[in-house]
Image: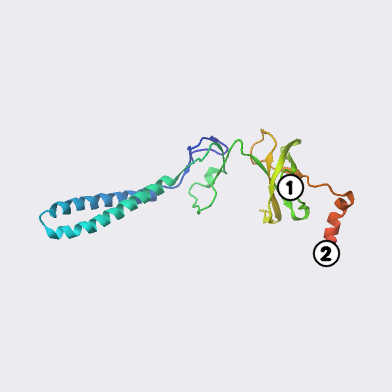
Amino acid sequence: FHVAPNEQVKAGQALFSFDEASLAARRDVAEQTLATAEAEYRQFAQQALTDNKSKTQLSMLLGRIEEKRTEAAFLGEQLQRARVTAPLAGTALFDDPTEWIGKPVQTGERVMRIAAPGDVEVEAWVSLADAIPLAEGAPLTLYLAADPLASIDARVRYMAHDAVARPNGSYAYRVRAKLAGATRQRVGLKGTAKLQGHWVPLCYWVLRRPLASIRQALGI
């Protein structure tokens, strides 16, 4: 790793690198094989001036040269991809780097995220029992556990159509909301979100959960 957790990075700055030893060795072997094939081609090209038999070897050597050149170029591109750079400026978000060093990773596995300064959102989860209709732009108030006396206002951007499994095993609907203004709170803090939907009669609001529980119990 070339950066520390929560460090401010610039676009194009090196973030981390994969183990390059294997790729570098394969690239070096491919380049040496290419150089040998090119030297052999030049030798047969000189002999072809007086030896017709050598002319038949030229086309085969050309094919071998192109094959090794393509292999060397491919390994060079793979070696460049082993060095991951920041696609944009922001804050590098990841866990303890010592847990990643030497660990094999799979394609698609997330190592770190880059949070842009002006691209901060609120992620909230609405349980199945509290899944009220939320229109785009509905107000959301966030109370952070680190600062419970202050609130952060936001507007709902969307509410997921399908419920997904959370890390604790429960199912809930994901809600994304854009902040109404700038905040000094760091990314990743947790708290409680208060969502507001349409107005309903007080009796419906009081009896909604008991009626839902009775209906589920009776199966009607």
Q: Residue furthest left?
A: 50
Residue 217: name its quadrant.
Answer: bottom right
Above or below residue 28? Residue 117 is above
69 left or right of 122 in image: left
Q: Residue at x 83, y 63 (%)?
A: 215
Question: How far apart are labels 1 and 2 at the CA level?
Answer: 30 Å
Please identify the residue farthest to the front as the structure is shown: 136
Q: Position of residue 53 (x, y in %)?
A: 14, 60
Earlier in the chain: of badge 1 and badge 2, it is 1
Residue type for callout 2: Ala
Q: Residue at coordinates 81% horizontally, 63% vertically from top-left? A: 216
Q: Position of residue 74 (x, y in %)?
A: 37, 51
Residue 4: mark in rendering = none
Mark 1 burial class by Cα count in 10 Å: few <14, some 14-19, many 20+ = some
Q: Which residue in the protein does label 1 denote? A: 135
Q: Secondary structure at mark 1?
A: loop
Residue 25 in sight here: no
Amino acid bearing label 1? Ala
**Residue 151 picture quarter:** top right
Q: Position of residue 108 (x, y in %)?
A: 52, 52
